[in-house]
Amino acid sequence: MRSVYARALQTSLTKSYTVATLPDGDVGFRQSVDQYYDRAALILEDRLVESFGDRTPERERRRKVNGMLNIIKPCNTFLSMTFPIKRDNGDYELITAWRAQHSHHRKPCKGGIIFSDKIDAEYVKANAALTTYKLACVGVPFGGAHAGVQIDPTKYSDVELEKIVRRLTIEMAKRSFIGPAIDVPAPDLGATDLMMSYMADTYKSTLGHMDLNAIATVTAKAISQGGIRGRDAAIGLGIYYGLRTFMKEALYLSSVGLTPGFYNKTFIVQGFGHVGLHTAKLLHSAGARCIGVEEVGGAIYNDEGINPDELEEYYKEHKTLVGFPGAAAYSGDSILEEECDILCPCATHDVIHSGNVGHIKAKVIAEGANGPITPQAYQVLLESNKLVLPDLFINSGAVIVSYLEWLKNIRHVSFGRLTFKYTKDTNYMLLDSVQKSLERIFGRKPGSIPVTPSEQFGKRIAGASETDIVYSSLEYTIENASRDLMSNAQKYDLGLDLRTAAYITALEKIFEVYKEAGLTLA
Ligand SMILES: NC(=O)C1=CN([C@@H]2O[C@H](COP(=O)(O)OP(=O)(O)OC[C@H]3O[C@@H](n4cnc5c(N)ncnc54)[C@H](O)[C@@H]3O)[C@@H](O)[C@H]2O)C=CC1
Ligand SMILES: O=C(O)CCC(=O)C(=O)O
């Protein structure tokens, strides 16, 4: 029998991650975050200078603004770790891992952990910076961080992975790189919720044993370990809500040659892991037609539509998409290049680059993955009137719901628990009071006037459950962020360049924090 660990890992760890070799001249994910930041900073600079008022000479104000813009960009603190583990066969091995805390403008820091042998220290720093901008873009009050463990997790047993996660936690704890008020990790590529439960358990049993808030030190834990309902689907749901907002915007859609709404729009998903699976399911439920899905073992295609729920079952059992009865094995060059309305790259970075961008036919691209498009390719997409919904906005569902989990943990009570009974009693009292008022006016004869809740109200009569709160808060946050992006795109005359609009949204907020807090001990 396979262990729980192995079962939990089965979908995310049974493959190796392929990363495109970029054509000459293409800048990949690592440099791209800094480039986008620079562009946003350049556009904002004059306004930021103005924002200081005119009591100080302009030269002085500009100096201050440039100083602050330079402070925001680099990684604040960086931890490089090597530690040994004893493997099941008796060998000793050194594990290399990193945690980058990109920004301390808000505490704690927050961000995922990637388990992959295709990453390095610079990649981790880039992801940490992107996380700072992502958090600020959607208004989650944390600083950005990210971690990487440089192993291919498929090559390690569940016991070995547990050892690595527990030792990693201790290494981070020793150096104050983990803690509910300091830095709060979560799973990313190649990681699982079970790993997060081990991490929380290790912290609370060691350095955090006196800390009442110890379990708030990691998010995306199992529910029994203080996790939150709704986290599983959070990223896909965020992508769906974000797409839905833009799929209502006739102005944006007409620029790319689409009509509003999801019904019968075609979509293709790359990567059928945490992000891709839920995105496909939700778009399918909204009436869009999934015509292609790609995984590392091969892609499948069906113009008539693929049912993602059935595909999920098939994939769990067979560990490959190919052979799924509801679609044919894809035999073209690249499914990313197929005709479709919405393309969702939800696997890894740098998959659309200057070598293939000319063949991309999708009209809307939702960046489920972090950094799936190189800056060179992005420019081409903009010039060919494609609408790209950028990573720092569209895949922010995880950080939004992580924030709710952290809040739940430090409040020590699940959402709704304190108010369920009171809300339900109040709502029944309200119905009763309406009934009595009607009877006072119309009398009780020939019988009492029944006032019963409608089906919809009946479902909500006891108030919001944890899942209701998570989903509605996610929806609210993404819709708000969408409006910020649209308004900044208009204000700065950016056309379809929502990435720059998102970086500007983030940068304005971070700048404001520095501006009003001043520089400690400066
Ligand atoms: N898990 C999270 O909380 C978040 C993840 N992301 C990003 O989304 C992306 C995917 O993350 P997860 O879904 O969590 O990882 P995952 O490990 O659950 O799934 C990724 C899937 O993509 C597949 N894949 C990898 N390379 C591929 C390729 N070249 N072509 C086709 N399929 C490929 C893998 O086999 C795997 O099934 C990453 O870029 C990650 O950084 C973004 C926001 C939040
Ligand atoms: O929920 C989190 O803290 C991490 C999410 C993440 O890894 C990401 O957004 O890239």
Image (spheres, rainbow, N blue to C red):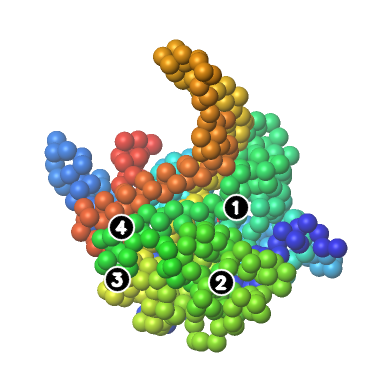
> What amino acid is labelled 1 in the image?
Asp
Q: Position of residue 1 (x, y in %)?
A: 86, 63
Residue 179, above or below 446: below
Label disc, if present, on residue 306 of the rendered structure: 2
Asked which secondary structure carries label 3, the reply is: loop
Pointers 3 and 2 in contact (CB under 8 A)?
no
**Residue located beneath label 4 in the image:** 249
Disc 4 marks a residue whose amino acid type is Glu
Q: Are marks 1 and 2 in contact (CB under 8 Å)?
A: no
Determine whether the beta carbon of the residue marked 2 sits less than 8 angstroms from the nearest atom of ligand 1.
Answer: no
Secondary element type, mark 4: loop
Q: Residues within 10 Å of mark 1 (few under 14, many from 20)?
A: some
Indicate the amino acid at tag 3. Answer: Gly
Q: Which comes sooner in the sequence, label 4 or label 3?
A: 4
Q: Residues within 10 Å of mark 4 (few under 14, many from 20)?
A: few
Of 2 and 236, nearer the camera is 236
First in sequence, mark 1 or 4: give its number: 1
CB of mark 4 near ligand 1 (< 8 Å):
no
Asked if disc 1 is less than 8 Å from ligand 1, the answer is no
**Which label is found at residue 257?**
3
Q: For the residues carrying marks 1 and 2, which lies nearer the camera in this image?
A: 2
Q: Position of residue 184 (x, y in %)?
A: 57, 45
